[in-house]
């Protein structure tokens, strides 16, 4: 990577005097060392190449790091696009293509690429800038993957057995149908149609089983790379502390691919303002916040405005009203008041330097930021280090523990209270211990109650004895179980779910709290559940889990959410 050059007082932009020389000093040019060494570039490129998939280039060769990683409310992904005449970059939902939807295209709005990309990259950098946290998350993901591998291996054996049984059922049905056709002496065309009708549902079920088997095999192949991915992530974390800031869009796209980042739009895209007015541009160009005009502030600026009366005014507008109208317009983007004179007065103040002096006097007052001209919709950012959300560091409790005192576990208190000295049980680790330390967002506490995010120090518990998905509870208060009944909504294809029905024997992953475990589905009399249906099902999990009535969960298959439900009965 070539060295960077920073030019201070660039001759093409610096203010000059009558003699053509810069007013504030000569131009200074600083040459910075390369961000990456040649060896680091090769090492990082080798790690990223193992996980590179597809192209992120737009129609004119520009790179869009988030192409196919942003998903709209319609469930379809966004791709990079641009208006060649004005070089405007944005992301556009593929649902706009009428051939992909039956309703004539989705209503997802396009998103400014120059606003979305820095936002997502900032979230990724916050994660990667803490190597210890990333390493811990990678270890959790590895343990979870190894645990799930055992479940998926059993699932593969079960699917192989079902496919074999299904092929046997097809052969038997074909034999019976052929005998019935021969006995009825049907014409050949009618006979073939009758046999095809008898075999069609069996072939559809076989195709679904083979599809599930292919997904399991793909998952197992992906899990085989767990050790290499952890090493790649740890190496990336070491570079992230200072060097990810300057990555090019192409390199950003490769890092996002390594982390398997997925951005989901959870709300409507705010309407973009057509452009800044002269007021908001004045504040934005100078990176200034909008001050709040108080009585004390007015006393400070009134002499400046009084001294600026060098000509006769015809608008008769009070000076304070004009100042407050300007600040309100900068703060809210609202139009000028109906009375004439506000806009011309502001432009006159700017031209004569009066407005600059007024803002300098109000620099220490309370202030608000200038509203973003290109606001983003609410977003959810997910990664493959952990199948659930990547939380900001500030939202996750942290606690420093001297070696040998125990292990810290973090999470949210669902109900009741927990205090230092309480005896607790770790469900999943089958261990009873005592809480010897308690913190909430880095602050030591004596107790915590329902709704608090806490870090608990568990005495004498080895670090490798607990993992994501375990539950800390009062001894005997919760009984783990494998079997439960639930009310489940099966997501439709438009919502990102399956395109085919599910039936008894379906074996997906169930995400309960922060754990995921495979489970067998029994639909009872319903027989099948089509996308968009709400059904009652009985589930047999692959291992005991702490279950309670009212507990919500998600159903995932092949890396996507296909259903959501609530436990209605345990056992």
Image (spheres, rainbow, N blue to C red):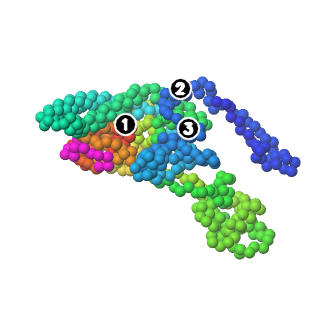
Q: Nearer the viewer, mark 1 or mark 3?
A: 3
Residue 185, x across and y down, in percent: 14, 35
Q: Residues within 10 Å of mark 3 (few under 14, many from 20)?
A: some
- Residue at horizontal 37 percent and vertical 36 percent from the top: 558
Location of the N terminus (image quadrant): top right
Task: In the rendered view, tell whether residue 125 sits above or below residue 337.
Answer: above
- Residue at horizontal 31 percent and vertical 28 percent from the top: 153
Task: Write the start and end of the magenta stretch as one range.
Answer: 521-533
For marks 2 and 3, the one nearer the N-term is 2
Task: In the rendered view, tell whether residue 67 sits above or below residue 347.
Answer: above
Q: Nearer the viewer, mark 2 or mark 1?
A: 1
Look at the image and say whether residue 531 sits in the magenta stretch: yes
- Secondary structure of the residue carrying numbered label 3: loop
As drawn, the residue found furthest toward the right would be 19
Task: In the rendered view, tell whether residue 375 sits above or below residue 50.
Answer: below
Task: In the rendered view, tell whether residue 173 sits above or below residue 535.
Answer: above
- Secondary structure of the residue carrying numbered label 2: helix
Residue at image mark 2: 46
For marks 1 and 3, the one nearer the N-term is 3
Residue at image mark 1: 558
CA gap, disc 2 and disc 1? 27 Å
Number of numbered discs on residues: 3
- Secondary structure of the residue carrying numbered label 1: loop
Residue at image mark 3: 57
Are discs 2 and 3 less than 8 Å apart at CB? no
């Amino acid at each position: 990577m070539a060295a960077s050059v920073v030019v201070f007082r660039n001759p093409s932009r610096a203010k000059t005097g009558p003699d053509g020389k810069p007013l504030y000093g000569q131009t200074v040019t600083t040459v910075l060392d390369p961000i990456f060494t040649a060896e680091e570039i090769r090492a990082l490129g080798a790690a990223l190449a193992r996980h590179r998939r597809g192209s992120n280039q737009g129609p004119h060769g520009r790179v869009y790091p988030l192409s196919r990683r942003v998903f709209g409310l319609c469930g379809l992904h966004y791709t990079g696009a641009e208006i060649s005449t004005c070089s405007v970059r944005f992301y556009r939902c593929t649902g706009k293509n009428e051939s992909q939807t039956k309703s004539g295209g989705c209503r997802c709005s396009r998103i400014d690429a120059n606003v979305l990309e820095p936002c997502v990259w900032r979230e990724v950098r916050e994660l990667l800038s803490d190597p210890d946290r990333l390493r811990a998350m990678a270890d959790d993901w590895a343990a979870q993957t190894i645990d799930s591998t055992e479940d998926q291996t059993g699932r593969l054996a079960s699917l192989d057995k079902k496919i074999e049984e299904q092929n046997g059922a097809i052969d038997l049905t074909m034999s019976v149908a052929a005998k019935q056709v021969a006995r009825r002496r049907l014409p050949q065309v009618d006979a073939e149609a009758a046999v095809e009708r008898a075999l069609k549902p069996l072939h559809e079920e076989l195709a679904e089983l083979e599809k599930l088997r292919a997904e399991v095999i793909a998952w197992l192949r992906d899990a085989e790379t767990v050790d290499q991915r952890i090493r790649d992530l740890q190496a990336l974390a070491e570079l992230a502390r200072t060097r990810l800031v300057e990555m090019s869009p192409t390199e950003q796209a490769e890092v996002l691919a390594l982390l398997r980042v997925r951005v989901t739009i959870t709300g409507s895209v705010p309407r973009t303002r057509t452009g800044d007015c002269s007021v908001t541009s004045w504040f934005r160009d100078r990176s200034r916040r909008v001050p709040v005009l108080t009585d004390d502030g007015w006393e400070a600026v009134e002499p400046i405005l009084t001294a600026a009366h060098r000509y006769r005014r015809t608008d008769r507008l009070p000076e304070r009203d004009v100042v407050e109208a300007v600040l309100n317009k900068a703060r809210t983007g609202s139009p000028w008041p109906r009375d004439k004179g506000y806009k011309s007065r502001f432009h006159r103040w700017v031209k004569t330097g009066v407005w600059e002096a007024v803002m300098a006097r109000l620099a220490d007052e309370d202030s608000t930021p200038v509203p973003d001209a290109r606001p983003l919709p609410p977003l959810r950012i997910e990664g493959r280090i952990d199948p659930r959300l990547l939380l900001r560091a500030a939202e996750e409790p942290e606690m420093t523990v001297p070696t040998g005192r125990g292990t810290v576990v973090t999470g949210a208190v669902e109900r009741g209270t927990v205090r230092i000295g309480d005896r607790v049980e770790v469900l999943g680790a089958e261990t009873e211990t005592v809480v010897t330390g308690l913190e909430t967002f880095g602050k030591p506490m004596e107790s915590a109650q329902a709704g608090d995010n806490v870090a608990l120090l568990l005495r004498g518990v080895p670090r490798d004895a607990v993992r994501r998905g375990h539950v800390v509870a009062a001894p005997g208060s919760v009984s783990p179980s494998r079997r439960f009944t639930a009310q489940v909504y099966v997501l439709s294809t438009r919502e990102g779910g399956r395109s085919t029905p599910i039936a008894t024997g379906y074996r997906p992953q169930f995400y309960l709290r922060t754990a995921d475990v495979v489970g067998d589905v029994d639909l009872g009399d319903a027989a099948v559940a089509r996308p968009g249906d709400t059904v009652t099902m009985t589930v047999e999990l692959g291992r005991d889990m702490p279950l309670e009535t009212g507990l919500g969960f998600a159903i995932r298959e092949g890396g996507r959410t296909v259903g959501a439900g609530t436990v209605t009965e345990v056992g």
